[in-house]
């Protein structure tokens, strides 16, 4: 039987290690240099839109109507009209910056203790965040001067919030990089007990991330990206890159510990763990491709980013890693750390001792443990039945105590609907256009029926009209959603009935509602695609319908548990303070689909690795129970180490400032932890034990499927012994 692709790549890399290593370095340098020179293109707010709100933004964009970045500054005093001097001085200071326009007269509140300053930033709204700093400085100066006089100043707007979001994302990504990498390195030091062995997976994962960053920058010129895409790529790249290297390296060390020479050990690792890495990487990439079916630009960007970084990490693991292992030889254990690199009497590294003891009762009473594990996962998933999703506004993303959130809360309390009004966009296609009598009457009717505070702006040259409609409350709650629904379903259709016009409702809340509706439509085809792909890949890899079906079922249990924990922590606030977060009453609306896709992909890392080892034992003639015992115990160390690293990396994201990053980190971290412990160590072995020989039965109609060997037999061909490779232990 011929060696598989992973084996051939590993052998070639070991025999051409200079070419493999220099080729990898050249690839990383070129990808980084070219990508950095091209720069990354981020998606505009208009591009992110879907549904009616997206069509409204498209009309304005096509008509060349610039949507200025609006800003609100509220000046509050202890007494009625006590704000006048401070508001007047601040208005002059803001005008003096030269960066604003359309400064309106102060708008007093009902009790006249507060006044709202409304203005716009000059220039295009896309770059307003880069020009807002002088305005922020002027507001901060007024706040400092007014503090001693009982004057409070609050600012919220498009440019100021975008500026703070950009700064926070940059700080968070830096924090993640400088925290996650040392954490992963520390865990690997404990796992391998040697500095070089620990540095190797981290180094390869980081170079994979760097190269993928460059490739993503190039791709962004065709598919514009969201701001958080790089954070997602780094999270996935570091976790997957380290995992793949860890699987490969642990298998090579285990084979050397079992008595094989260095060349044979490297070949076996390439044929087994290398093959598992290829299958797992392919599964992850195809699963990520399912996000293209969502119909949302955000997920298309996530798909491109994750596919790129997983591909690069997989490529490095099966090419340059064998070359480095061959070149390093015994030096892989350089920098030994006392007490962390113990060997047993035979000189072999202990592997699976603790796992064997834990597995013994599971195999003895499989029905009890299968039911117990399933009940535990279902109990954790129970809160997800009441999951609520929404597009969290910036005031929720930053946390309730953040200055931006405080400003938003104070402004909306005194001036409801101010920061986030609904926006009705109208384009007339009939003769006379927007200036016709019929259109004027329709627009007047909308302004009248929309309620108090509605403002009409007509862009005569562009043939487009806009109507800003304040929404009740903070502009995003139940009252606001009800008012938005009335606008979309009643007010707008009634006003333009019979007219040849396009009229759509946009704005922040409309964007969120339309985004959620598209997600609801997209999640079914995405899930169907991922489940089908997972089933087919598992079927072709193991020739077993049972293994393919159980892999999907186990993944769904992990995903359900992750949903339940996310809902409990972030929607209900149970234990949120333990991670420095708080109850926000909902889950970010893109999070469930993202977690589903990522976990289906990542779970295959463990599933393919473990089941491949069980199948390998079966190919050697062991019965089902013995094969399960050997497969689980032999992979326990690698799976545990990989899971700990993944959980640690995800946990770092769970402690960042942004609410969506926290939700992503907690959801993925909990799911991986449960998947590597409850699922792989308890539910999988107990279920496979109960199923017995049915695990490996191939239906007659699928007998044509090719037989794939999971063992080392095909990678030790009879040939003259090659030159000796130094020992890797």
Image (tube, rainbow, N blue to C red):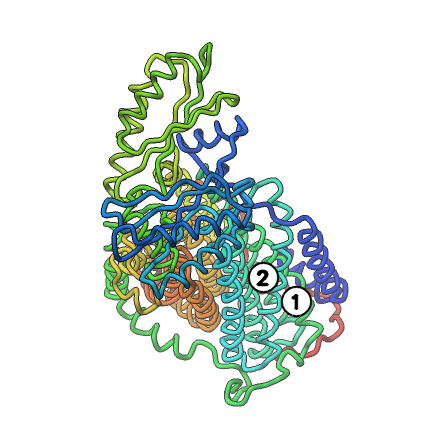
Rendering coords of residue 245 (x, y %): 57, 66
Find residue 625 and report its horizontal and vertical position in percent: 37, 66
Number of disc labels: 2
Which residue of the protein is positioned furthest toward the top in this rendering?
Answer: 431
State yes or no: discs 1 and 2 in contact (Cβ < 8 Å).
Answer: yes
Q: CA distance from mark 1 to mark 2?
A: 10 Å
Left or right: 509 as drawn, with respect to 726: left
Q: What secondary structure is marked by label 2?
A: helix
Compare residues 369 and 61 and report the one nearer the observer.
61
Q: Which residue is mark 2?
A: 274
- Helix or strand or loop: what does disc 1 sit on? helix
Dot 1 crowding, Cα within 10 Å, few <14, some 14–19, many 20+: many
Query: Residue at coordinates 37% horizontally, 33% vertically from top-left?
Result: 468
The answer to whether residue 433 shows anywhere in this view is yes
Height in image: 655 above or below 230?
below
Dividing the picture into quadrants, the one containing residue 487 is top left
Residue located farthest toward the front when viewing the structure as drawn: 85
Point out residue 146 in the picture as x, y percentages from the top left corner: 37, 61
Please tell me how crowded label 2 is: few (under 14), some (14-19), or many (20+) other residues with Cα within 10 Å. Answer: many
Q: Please report the residue visible at 35 percent of the width from the left and 78 percent of the height from the top.
A: 357
- Give the camera-side residue of 362 and 500: 500
- Residue 203 in the image: x percent, y percent? 61, 69
Q: Is residue 61 above or below residue 684?
A: above
Q: Which residue is mark 1?
A: 322
């Amino acid at each position: 039987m011929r060696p598989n692709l992973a084996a051939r790549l590993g052998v070639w890399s070991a025999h051409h290690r200079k070419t493999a290593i220099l080729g990898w370095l050249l690839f990383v340098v070129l990808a980084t240099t070219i990508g950095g020179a091209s720069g990354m293109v981020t998606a505009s707010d208009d591009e992110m839109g879907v549904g009616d709100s997206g069509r409204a933004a498209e009309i304005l964009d096509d008509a060349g109507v610039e949507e200025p970045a609006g800003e609100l500054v509220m000046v509050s005093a202890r007494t009625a009209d006590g704000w006048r001097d401070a508001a007047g001085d601040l208005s002059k200071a803001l005008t003096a910056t030269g960066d604003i326009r359309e400064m309106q007269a102060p708008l007093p509140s009902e009790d006249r203790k507060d006044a709202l300053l409304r203005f716009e930033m000059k220039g295009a709204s896309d770059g307003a965040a880069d020009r807002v700093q002088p305005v922020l400085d002027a507001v901060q100066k007024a706040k400092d001067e007014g503090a001693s006089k009982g004057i409070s100043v609050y600012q919220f707007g498009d440019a100021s919030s975008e500026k703070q979001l950009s700064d926070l994302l940059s700080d968070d990504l830096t924090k993640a990089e400088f925290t996650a990498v040392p954490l992963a390195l520390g865990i690997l030091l404990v796992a391998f007990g040697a500095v070089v062995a620990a540095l190797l997976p981290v180094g390869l994962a980081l170079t994979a991330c760097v190269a993928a960053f460059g490739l993503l920058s190039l791709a962004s010129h065709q598919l514009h990206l969201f701001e958080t895409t790089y954070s997602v790529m780094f999270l996935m790249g570091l976790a997957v890159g380290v995992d793949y290297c860890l699987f490969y390296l642990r298998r090579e060390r285990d084979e050397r510990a079992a008595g094989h020479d260095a060349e044979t050990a490297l070949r076996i690792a390439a044929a087994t763990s290398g093959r598992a890495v290829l299958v797992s990487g392919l599964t992850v990439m195809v699963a990520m491709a399912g996000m293209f079916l969502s119909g949302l630009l955000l997920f298309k960007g996530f798909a491109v980013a994750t596919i790129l970084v997983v591909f690069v990490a997989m490529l490095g693991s099966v090419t340059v890693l064998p070359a480095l292992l061959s070149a390093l030889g015994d030096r892989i254990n350089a920098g030994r750390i006392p007490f962390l690199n113990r060997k047993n009497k035979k000189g072999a590294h202990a592997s699976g001792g603790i796992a064997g003891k834990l597995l013994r009762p599971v195999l003895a009473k499989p029905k009890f443990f299968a039911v117990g594990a399933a009940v535990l996962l279902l109990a954790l998933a129970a809160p997800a039945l009441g999951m609520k999703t929404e597009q969290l506004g910036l005031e929720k993303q930053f946390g309730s105590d953040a200055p931006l959130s405080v400003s938003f809360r104070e402004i909306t309390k005194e001036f409801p609907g101010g920061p986030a009004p609904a926006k009705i966009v109208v384009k007339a296609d009939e003769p006379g256009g927007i200036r016709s009598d019929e259109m004027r009457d329709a627009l007047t009717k909308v302004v009248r029926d929309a309620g108090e505070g509605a403002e009409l702006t007509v862009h005569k040259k562009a043939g487009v009209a806009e109507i800003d409609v304040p929404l009740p409350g903070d502009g995003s709650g139940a009252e606001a959603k009800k008012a938005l629904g009335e606008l979309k379903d009643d007010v707008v259709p009634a006003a333009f009935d019979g007219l040849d016009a396009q009229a759509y409702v946009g704005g922040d809340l409309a964007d969120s509602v339309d985004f959620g509706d598209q997600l609801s439509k997209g999640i079914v085809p995405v899930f169907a695609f991922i489940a089908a792909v997972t089933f087919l890949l598992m079927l072709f890899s193991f020739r077993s319908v049972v293994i393919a079906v159980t892999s999907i079922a186990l993944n769904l249990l992990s995903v359900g548990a992750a949903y339940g924990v996310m809902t409990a922590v972030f929607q209900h606030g149970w234990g949120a303070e333990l991670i420095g977060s708080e109850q926000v009453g909902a889950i970010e609306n893109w999070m469930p689909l993202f977690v589903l896709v990522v976990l289906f992909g990542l779970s295959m890392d463990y599933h393919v690795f473990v089941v491949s080892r069980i199948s390998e034992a079966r190919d050697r003639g062991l019965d089902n129970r013995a094969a399960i015992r050997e497969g689980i115990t032999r992979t326990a160390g690698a799976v545990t180490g990989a899971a700990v690293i993944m959980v640690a990396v995800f946990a770092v994201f769970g402690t960042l400032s942004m609410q969506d990053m926290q939700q992503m980190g907690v959801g993925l971290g909990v799911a991986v932890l449960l998947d590597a412990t409850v699922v792989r160590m308890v539910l999988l072995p107990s279920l496979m034990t109960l199923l017995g020989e049915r695990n490996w039965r191939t239906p007659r109609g699928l007998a044509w499927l090719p037989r794939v060997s999971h063992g080392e037999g095909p990678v030790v061909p009879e040939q003259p012994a090659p030159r000796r490779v130094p020992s890797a232990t």
